[in-house]
Image (cartoon, rainbow, N blue to C red):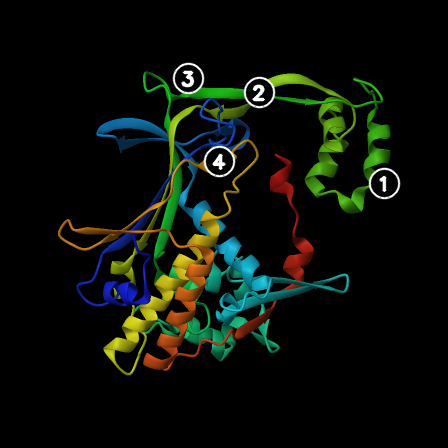
Amino acid sequence: MSTITLQHLLDACSPGGASVLTSVTPLEPAAGPHASVAPAKYLEGKGRDAKSVFAYERRFWNGEAVTAVVIDAKPSQINRVEATMSAAIADGDPVLARTPRIELHFERDGKEIVYSDLDLPHRAFDGQIRAGTINGELAIEAQEYQDLRDATVNHARPLLECSPITLLFGGWDASRKSHQGRYRSILVGEIIGILADQDGDPEVNQSKRGGTRIDPLGARIQLDRAGRKAIADAQKEELSKKTYDNSIGKDEKEGLARLGVGGIPPSLEQLGGVTCQAIIRSHVLSFAALRALRFDSPTPEGDVACRALLAALALNGLARSDAELLLRANCDLVETGPAVVTLDKRYGQKENFEPLSIDQAQELLSAAIDHATQEANLTWDGSVLVVEGNPAILNAATDDAQDD
């Protein structure tokens, strides 16, 4: 079985080409099929009534309607692809480093902090970028950034040459009063688990995880409000406002817990894992969505070359992400077989390929870059649009949400 080539991508990105390329991988818990896995958690309800839950859905598997749990949702899977690409660029990867990008720069205590559009949730249209400056000018007034915001699906070259990741993984300039840029994600993916027990309430598959903390000084430590305040005051600069306020509040038990003092008896209050009979990771690369993009190329072949470049960039990120099965604690997974990569050939015809290794994906992306720069006169040289972040936002940032 062969691997996908640049010619396959060019054919798929041409009118009448393939609709999608899919990659489906069977997985199982690293400890074995007997082990449970910890799916993603979501908050259900608001305020004090909010509770953590797993997301269950009805799916179709092996010819039957079944109940599945979302182990890793579509946004999370794309974030994992972005993270591997961002890390490779930071490490100076010679191919990915040629990718144009936006960088957001901050300075804290004399040290530079840098985020790129691969790290920011709304990519080129992120609020952090809009609040920043470019060469001393408000970002929203700088011509370089206005060009990105004024780009459209039919005139997408400015984004391709400055923030291709926005075209690849999607972006929406939602805060703009008019002429909002909207770009759907070209690559999507997810990991789901087919529940082991399909009868009755899906929560029967859930386990509870015990939480405990041992303090070597004593299982119980009593500190009045004044004592807790003295400890909290000494650490005030390191504590978020929410943690500080709760640590000196009237509730002694909560206050000590916030300060990390004293023991916590074992309990089964936290969501644990879910038992699955099968786990499936799947990704879909949409050539139909790519063909909707135009890049003001001199010839139609130039636009095809630009689309193929985005497809190769997606496959490069996917090869890297698939090689790193890193999710969350108590959710270590392994492949039980190779990824099944399938190219839609239209009208029910399909062609299968070997999954790309990182080295093969590198060769494919390098060839796609060279082809697009020649066919479309594309600038793709690792240029970086530097945005100076707003220091007021940096100074106001806390991690209160992580205290819950």
As displayed, is residue 345 above or below residue 197?
Answer: below
Q: Which mark is residue 234?
A: 1
As displayed, is residue 55 above or below residue 379?
Answer: above
User: Amino acid type of disc 1?
Assistant: Ala
Labels 4 & 2 near each other (Cβ < 8 A): no
Labels 1 & 2 near each other (Cβ < 8 A): no
The mark that comes first in sequence, 4 or 2, is 2
Indicate which label's residue lies in the foreground, 1 or 4.
4
The mark that comes first in sequence, 1 or 4, is 1
Would you call the spot at circle 4 few (<14 residues within 10 Å), some (14-19), or many (20 or more)?
Answer: some
User: Amino acid type of disc 2?
Assistant: Glu
SS class of the residue under badge 4?
strand
**Residue under pointer 2:** 269
Q: Which mark is residue 333?
A: 4
Distance from Cα at disc 3 to Cα at disc 2: 16 Å
The mark that comes first in sequence, 1 or 3, is 3
| Residue lying at 86% horizontally and 35% vertically, measured from the top left | 230
User: Amino acid type of disc 4?
Assistant: Leu
Q: Quadrant of residue 186?
A: bottom left
From this viewpoint, is residue 365 visible? yes
Work out whether residue 112 or residue 187 is closer to the camera in this orientation and state it: 187
SS class of the residue under badge 3?
helix
Distance from Cα at disc 1 to Cα at disc 4: 42 Å
SS class of the residue under badge 1?
helix
Q: In the image, is 60 to the left or to the right of 174?
A: left
User: Amino acid type of disc 3?
Assistant: Val
Indicate which label's residue lies in the foreground, 1 or 3.
3
| Residue lying at 49% horizontally and 55% vertically, measured from the top left | 82
Distance from Cα at disc 4 to Cα at disc 3: 22 Å
Q: Quadrant of the C terminus?
A: top right
**Residue under pointer 3:** 204
